Amino acid sequence: MRQPETRVEVYAIKVTLLGTSPSVWRRILVPREITLRNLHRTLQTIMGWTNSHLHQFVFKRQKYSDPKFGLGAGIIDEKRTRLGDLVCTPRTRFLYEYDFGDGWQHDLLLEEVLLGDESFHQICVAGKRSCPPEDCGGSEVFAELLTALQDTKHPNHEEACEWLGDFDPESFSADEINRRLRRRTH
């Protein structure tokens, strides 16, 4: 007799990079049982970050991160915390902070709880715009860089072109992100 398929809860999460205009965002599907440590790795991949800086999750004033970072007393170990232990109801929000110097804050919104089968793998299903490059100085400096990049008469246009190279702020490819996710998980 054939074994019934195991069903897994899948969270549809919208990730919005705060302070960007127009907005940089991604929609991902992840298993309810993902640890915050693995969610951090997923967020790094889908946003295009390089995991070069400290990070933390904040939910109801409680902070979750890697205790070895030494971010202070009261930090809960992200490796021992599953996403489903924090959020389970659609429309619940929490914060992911990355690179405390640049201050990138991501609003994570649980949009929907779905059911998948045991073969489910996390995936990026939608999004808009390129994530800012690492170490660009935060949302205000990034906005200034984009203005200089797009205006050939801007006094810092050449410097912005040199620094950003072939950066396209409108670029987004779910296929490329999903290739990176698959490489990371295999």
Image (cartoon, grey):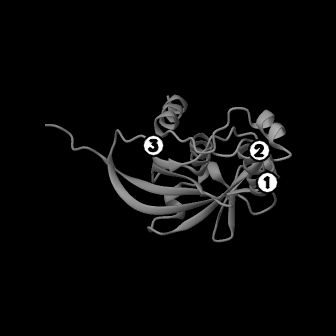
Label 2 element class? loop
Using the numbered discs, state the Cα–Cα distance from disc 1 to disc 3 in whole angstroms: 27 Å
Q: Residues within 10 Å of mark 3 (few under 14, many from 20)?
A: some
Q: Viewed as shown, does residue 116 lie left or right of 160? A: left
Q: Viewed as shown, does residue 182 lie left or right of 2? A: right
The residue at 63%/39% (across/down) is 168
Give the x, y percent position of residue 36.
59, 51
Cβ atoms under marks 1 and 3 closer than 8 Å: no
Give the x, y percent position of residue 175.
46, 35
**Which residue position is annotated with label 3?**
122
Q: Earlier in the sequence, mark 1 or mark 3?
A: 1
The residue at 73%/32% (across/down) is 165
Q: Residues within 10 Å of mark 2 (few under 14, many from 20)?
A: few
Q: What amino acid is at disc 1?
A: Phe
**Which residue position is annotated with label 1?**
100
Q: What amino acid is at disc 3?
A: Gln
Label 1 element class? loop
Label 3 element class? loop
Q: Earlier in the sequence, mark 2 or mark 1?
A: 2
Name the one closer to the observer, 161 or 79.
161
Using the numbered discs, state the Cα–Cα distance from disc 3 to disc 2 in whole angstroms: 23 Å
Using the numbered discs, state the Cα–Cα distance from disc 2 to disc 1 in whole angstroms: 8 Å
The residue at 61%/42% (across/down) is 41
- Looking at the rendered image, the quarter that the N terminus falls into is top left
**Which residue position is annotated with label 2?**
53
Q: What amino acid is at disc 2?
A: His
